[in-house]
């Protein structure tokens, strides 16, 4: 079930093996993203998630919009 988490939770979960997914378009992902984050643009998320993500690990989806 989706839920909002804070920065410390993200750090803890990534250290424990969670997958980070940035959903902005590829050009914006290339400009800036969290270390280790995968890029699955929102428009492609549903189609590519099953092929890309490990279903046995938690997933953290985020959108870094500096504007």
Image: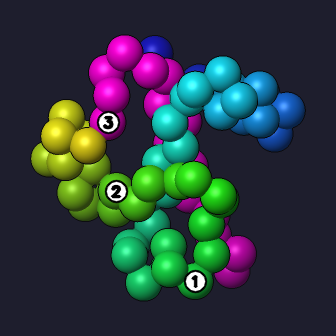
State yes or no: residue 26 in magenta.
no
Q: Reading the chain from its start, which is encountered first: label 3 or label 1? A: 1
Structural crowding at the residue carrying mark 1, measured as other residues with C-alpha within 10 Å and reported as few (<14), some (14–19) or many (≥20): few
Q: CA distance from mark 2 to mark 3?
A: 10 Å
Does the CB distance between marks 3 and 1 fall below 8 Å?
no
Nearest to the observer: residue 62 or residue 36: 36
Which picture quadrant has residue 6? top right
**Disc 2 or disc 3, which is closer to the eye?**
3
Residue 45 image offset from top left, x and y in percent: 27, 49
Structural crowding at the residue carrying mark 2, measured as other residues with C-alpha within 10 Å and reported as few (<14), some (14–19) or many (≥20): many
Q: Quadrant of the C terminus?
A: bottom right
What numbered label is drawn on residue 31?
A: 1
Which residue is outermost to the right?
8
Q: CA distance from mark 1 to mark 2?
A: 15 Å
State yes or no: residue 64 in magenta.
yes
Instruction: State the residue position of label 3.
Output: 53
Tell me the SS state at disc 1.
helix
Residue 38 image offset from top left, x and y in percent: 44, 54
Structural crowding at the residue carrying mark 3, measured as other residues with C-alpha within 10 Å and reported as few (<14), some (14–19) or many (≥20): some
Tell me the SS state at disc 3.
loop
What span is in magenta?
A: 53-67
Q: Reading the chain from its start, which is encountered first: label 1 or label 2? A: 1
What numbered label is drawn on residue 40?
A: 2
Residue 26 image offset from top left, x and y in percent: 38, 75
Q: Is 31 left or right of 4, judged from the image as shown?
A: left
The secondary structure that most of the magenta stretch takes on is loop
Which picture quadrant has residue 41? bottom left
Residue 49 image offset from top left, x and y in percent: 25, 41
Residue drawn at point x = 14 percent, y = 47 percent: 47
Q: CA distance from mark 3 to mark 1?
A: 22 Å
Residue 66 visible in the shown view: yes
Q: Is residue 30 above or below residue 51?
A: below
């Amino acid at each position: 079930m989706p839920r909002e988490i804070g920065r410390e939770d993200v750090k803890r979960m990534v250290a424990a093996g969670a997958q980070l997914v940035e959903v902005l378009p590829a050009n914006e992902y290339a400009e800036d993203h969290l270390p280790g984050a995968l890029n699955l643009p929102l428009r492609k998320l549903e189609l590519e998630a099953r092929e890309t993500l490990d279903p046995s690990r938690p997933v953290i989806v985020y959108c870094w919009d500096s504007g």
